[in-house]
Amino acid sequence: MKKNILLTIEYDGSSMKGWQKQEGQTTVQETLENALEKSLGERVVLEATGRTDAGVHAYGQCASFFTESGLPVNKIMRVTNNFLNVGERVSYPMGSIRVVDVKEVAEDFHARFSCIGKTYVYRLVPGDDVDIFKRSYCYNVKKDVDVGSMQEAVKKIIGKKDFACFQAAGGTPRKTTVRTIFDARILESGGELILVITGDGFLYNMVRIITGTLVDVGLGKIKPEEIDRMIEKKDRTLAGHTAPPTGLYLYKIYFDEGEMREWIDRIGMNTSWKWRS
């Protein structure tokens, strides 16, 4: 009997060429599909909620697929993770991908089209005294920044707006560049600044460009009030630089509005960031 399965996946993207399969490259999708083939005894095709770029990480990526395998749903995670940790390919870093949840969903469920919102986080470390072991997991700005100005600026991103100014060239063409940002804030934690942003969808490199723009605000290159103008003009050249992929994490996917609102409320009550909160 055919089953529709939803996976929640976390991965270290620092040595991956992104989510989507590419010939001759190590990607999350290909690696995970290969492990699932060994687990299930059949080839499956994963449909992800979103495609992360090379170097981008995930704590809560979601992907769905159909299977006719007789392997019980409650054993898919353990068996697949065992194959993911074998490291048969020299180019594949052991333990970079892990399935953290598996459940059967309705036949008409689709990880991409059933999604109503996503949360991304971006880790920033200001100053020149950054831990060398963080270099693939954060953006070291190398200078001190005005956190207050950045927190003022990020509020201007919230709402339903045309975010063409925060879209990079080269992505898949979209019918519209209008998106709704439900919540966006900058939190401080252990010497880091954490951008937490939740929306109904994001344009190509949108979070990274927003981050770069906020950093430029913090460095005094852009004034907080200029955010309104760049959004109104829909002009990419008015926005800031594109932050590197290393600090970006696809953190949480929502298929239920109540769950999303609860998450936003919890973030609003946090005085400091906790990764597993």
Image (cartoon, rainbow, N blue to C red):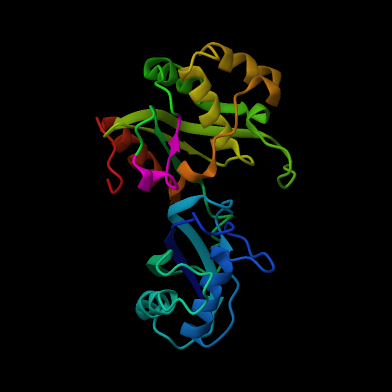
Position in image of residue 8 (x %, y %): 43, 62
Q: Is residue 118 visible?
A: no
Instruction: State which quadrant residue 25 falls in.
Output: bottom right
Q: Nearer the viewer, residue 163 or 68?
A: 163
> Which quadrant, please, contains the C terminus?
top left
Q: Is residue 226 magenta?
A: no
- Asked if 266 appears above or below 16 in the picture, the reply is above
Residue at image position (61%, 40%) is: 205
- Asked if 86 appears above or below 236 in the picture, the reply is below
Q: How many marks?
A: 0
Q: Is residue 162 visible?
A: yes
- Asked if 193 appears above or below 73 in the picture, the reply is above
Q: Nearer the viewer, residue 215 or 264?
A: 215
Residue at image position (54%, 35%) is: 243
Residue at image position (53%, 11%) is: 223
Position in image of residue 48 (x %, y %): 56, 60
Per the rendered image, the range of residues in magenta is: 131-141
22 with respect to 80 (left or right): right
- Asked if 188 appears above or below 64 in the picture, the reply is above
Position in image of residue 188 (x %, y %): 31, 29
Q: Nearer the viewer, residue 34 or 220?
A: 220
Q: Is residue 133 magenta?
A: yes
Instruction: State which quadrant residue 67 falls in.
Output: bottom right
